[in-house]
Image: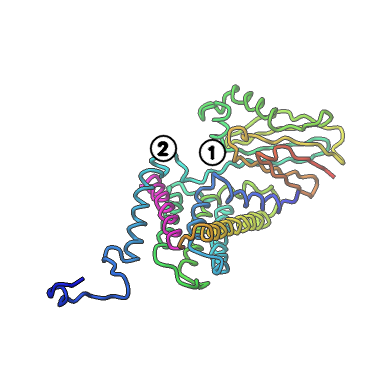
Amino acid sequence: MQLSPDLRKRKIPISTSPQIPFFCKPQLADAKLFTLLILLITTVLSPSSAGTSEAKHEYYIGVAEMECVENQIKASALFFADDLGLALGISSADWESPKADSALAKYFRQHLRFEQSTAPTFDWVGHEIQGEQIRCFLSAKSSNLRAFAAPLRFDILMDRYPAQKNLLHLRFGQRTKSWYFSERQRVQKLEIP
Amino acid sequence: MDSLYVFVRLGWDHILDLSATDHLLYLSMLAIRFVFADLKALLFRVSAFALGHAATTAISGLTGWTDSSGWVEFSIAASIALTALFNLPPAKKKTAFWEPQTALALFFGLVHGLGFGSYFSQLTASGSSLGISLLGFTLGIEFAQFALVFAWLGLWAIFESAFGWKHREWVLALSGAGCAWSIGWCIEKWPL
């Protein structure tokens, strides 16, 4: 094909690398992609627009301490009052009422107990509010706590909060043993040597 | 069961739990920038975070200090956004052990530890050593962090080999998502 004289004279720039428009230079394009993603996800997926509040790392942890004194196990358990209040339907203003005490006693009978017929049963003693936490007191009597072993259920709040973890520290004499209870390990074997 | 083991479990679950969104997101933003070749530098940075976390958990656990102003919660959210933003400049070929981001990881560990510390002493059995509990808790955090970091590096290796993705695209897309999420938190948790 014959080219016209005008076209033959025209200088066509030859480049070894493709020409990139200034707005597509790698770093600037990266920044644009980054900003676009931020805007998109902030609008659509961020916790505030989704109506949830997950920014705070919520801790679902309870702890109980038991002490073997002669033939008695004295127990105290510490939980967040607002979590227990939601589980039992008790408002913060009602914690001092007898109704709250009986609801707590019933709840603890179900969720803190030995799962063996010959093992001692915990009796409810009472509770007290400590700031934003609540401390519950229980006791159990047994004719022989030496060489005692029985499975213990300690799954308080686990039905309501699957992330709930409960720690148990058992003191006998100068020794302390600890157990970790989670949704998958609601029952653990307690052994007193 | 030994008390140390119980606190290792607690530390592990403190990180690898669905309610631990702040930790998961922060560590993810920290890890996605790295590849297996930079593993040592990444583990060093992650350990700096665990060290900071342990320091403030101990201090606030011993003193009973709690943040009532809301600045700690805001700072945790901001730390995630900033870590994501630090992923924006192109990564160097080889990451050095000591970089400004390592000091920042330590600082962010200090901030994150403040969010939990005040409750920690209550979890330790009365008469028992807080040091043993803290050691177990920190070890659990460290193990969980390593597990999460390996999961991210492994995931990247799979994406790279299966789909031929460029690492830069991977970092920017995930950092953008993480940054957006944490900016939402910053707005929500602005304390003033």
Left or right, A157 with reference to B114: right
Q: Nearer the viewer, residue B147 or B8?
A: B147
Q: Secondary structure at mark 2?
A: loop
Which residues make up the magenta segment? B167-192
Q: CA distance from mark 2 to mark 1?
A: 25 Å
Identify residue for label 1. A132
Q: Is disc 2 surrounded by few (<14), some (14 to 19) or many (20+) residues within 10 Å?
A: few
**Image position, residue B54 (x, y; %):** 58, 58
Whether residue B83 appears in this view of the structure is: no
Q: Earlier in the sequence, mark 2 or mark 1?
A: 2
Q: Is disc 1 surrounded by few (<14), some (14 to 19) or many (20+) residues within 10 Å?
A: few
**Image position, residue A93 (x, y; %):** 50, 28
Q: Nearer the viewer, residue A6 or A85?
A: A6
Q: Name above or below for residue A123 compared with residue A43.
A: above
Left or right, B71 with reference to A78: left
Q: Name above or below for residue B56 compared with residue A4.
A: above
Secondary structure predominantly adopted by residues drawn in magenta: helix
Q: Nearer the viewer, residue A2 or B1?
A: A2
Say if the magenta span includes residue B171: yes
Left or right, B148 with reference to A64: left
Q: Nearer the viewer, residue B192 or B148?
A: B148
Say if the magenta span includes residue B176: yes
Q: Dots 2 and 1: beta carbons under 8 Å?
A: no
Quadrant in the picture for residue A125:
top right
Q: Chain of mark 2?
A: A
Residue in the picture at 39% in, 66% down = B89
Q: Amino acid at mark 1?
A: Glu
Identify residue for label 2. A51
**Image position, residue B179 (x, y; %):** 41, 53
Residue A42's mark?
none
Residue in the picture at 34% in, 53% down = A36
